[in-house]
Image (spheres, rainbow, N blue to C red):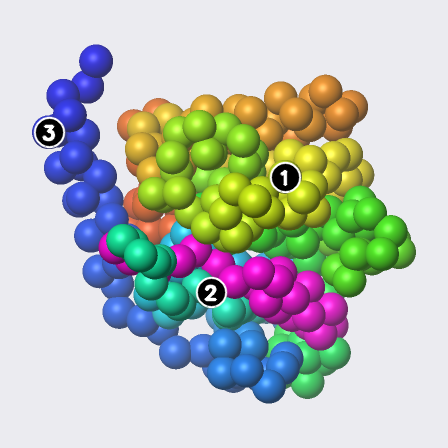
């Protein structure tokens, strides 16, 4: 069994490496709503024209201190690999839990979901103006951690029950989803206390959990019919492998095949770290769906 101190040191080093890169300014930014967080940063492909569009949804446990800036080096990495990139911001939790909380609440209900739905709906029009090099017919959605959850959810909106404000009448026009260490199975994530109770906070606590999970948990919104791949580090202690496996198992029971790539010796953050080999694996997974 790995030494806990050594594992903690490795986790800290991986996080420090991923967050050490200077933020990369976008080529343009556009709003999809009136709130300051309702914006998308666009990165043009550094080579070629008519490039596949990669929509990036950042992680950070749906909490306010973590915004899209920390994944701008990842967005730039994808742009340098020939993709057109849309890096989406959305509203996250910003209040301190009461009465004895010790950090920001995860997510806002329903605003976090309102924003992801609105951003994805607005993107085709925004791309035509702000990212003409992109081919929206070849769109792949990716996201890391909590953003991986949102990527899977965005691809499942046509599975939502009738009457949901986020429901689409038909499947979204996506080539696929590549979810990176996603919080993809809420029940398993709660059992493992992923990100300090973030899932329960996102859904507003125990009283609201069952009803809201039915329309927010990717594992409850299957099958989608959208090509889906999950990339997961075997040594991830932030969102453990068991969460990804529970989602993949749920998909199989629903009659859907989800690809699962497990990376040996990899924790949570190398998946979005341009300096890590795992990030190149992620780019290849996206390319397999997009090109």
Which residue position is annotated with label 3?
5
Which residue position is annotated with label 2?
92
Residue at x-position 67% and y-position 44%:
211
| Residue 126 as seen in the image, left or right of residue 46 | right
Q: Nearer the viewer, residue 282 or 150?
A: 150
Residue at x-position 52% and y-position 42%:
206
Depicted 29 relative to depicted 155: above or below:
below
Would you say the residues marked 2 and 3 are in contact, meaning their CB atoms lie under 8 Å apart?
no
Residue span colored magenta:
102-124
| Residue 204 as seen in the image, left or right of residue 156 | left
Q: Characterize the local packing of mark 1: few (<14), some (14-19) or many (20 or more) Cα atoms within 10 angstroms.
A: few
Query: x and y percent of residue 128 in the render?
Result: 72, 80
Depicted 55 relative to depicted 126: above or below:
above
Q: CA distance from mark 2 to mark 3?
A: 32 Å
Residue at x-position 34% and y-position 58%:
98
Q: Which mark is residue 210?
A: 1
């Amino acid at each position: 069994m790995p030494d806990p101190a050594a594992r903690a040191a490795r986790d800290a080093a991986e996080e420090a490496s991923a967050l050490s890169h200077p933020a990369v300014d976008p080529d343009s930014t556009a709003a999809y709503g009136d709130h300051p967080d309702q914006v998308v940063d666009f990165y043009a492909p550094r080579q070629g024209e008519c490039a596949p569009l990669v929509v990036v949804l950042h992680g950070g446990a749906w909490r306010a201190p973590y915004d899209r800036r920390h994944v701008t080096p990842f967005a730039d990495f994808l742009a340098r690999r020939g993709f057109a990139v849309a890096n989406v911001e959305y509203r996250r939790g910003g209040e301190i839990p009461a009465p004895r909380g010790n950090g920001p609440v995860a997510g806002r209900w329903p605003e976090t979901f309102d924003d992801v739905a609105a951003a994805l709906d607005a993107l085709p029009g925004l791309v035509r103006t702000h990212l003409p090099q992109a081919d929206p017919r070849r769109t792949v959605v990716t996201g890391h951690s909590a953003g991986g959850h949102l990527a899977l959810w965005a691809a499942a909106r046509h599975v939502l029950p009738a009457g949901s404000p986020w429901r689409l009448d038909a499947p979204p026009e996506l080539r696929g989803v590549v979810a990176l260490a996603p919080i993809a199975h809420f029940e398993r994530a709660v059992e493992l206390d992923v990100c300090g109770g973030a899932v329960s906070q996102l859904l507003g606590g125990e009283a609201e959990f069952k009803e809201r999970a039915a329309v927010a948990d990717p594992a409850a919104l299957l099958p989608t019919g959208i090509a889906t791949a999950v990339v997961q580090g075997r040594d991830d202690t932030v969102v453990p492998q068991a969460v990804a496996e529970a989602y993949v198992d749920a998909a199989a029971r629903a009659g859907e095949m989800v690809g699962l790539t497990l990376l040996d010796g990899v924790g949570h953050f190398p998946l979005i770290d341009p300096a890590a080999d795992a990030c190149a694996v992620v780019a290849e997974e996206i390319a397999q769906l997009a090109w």
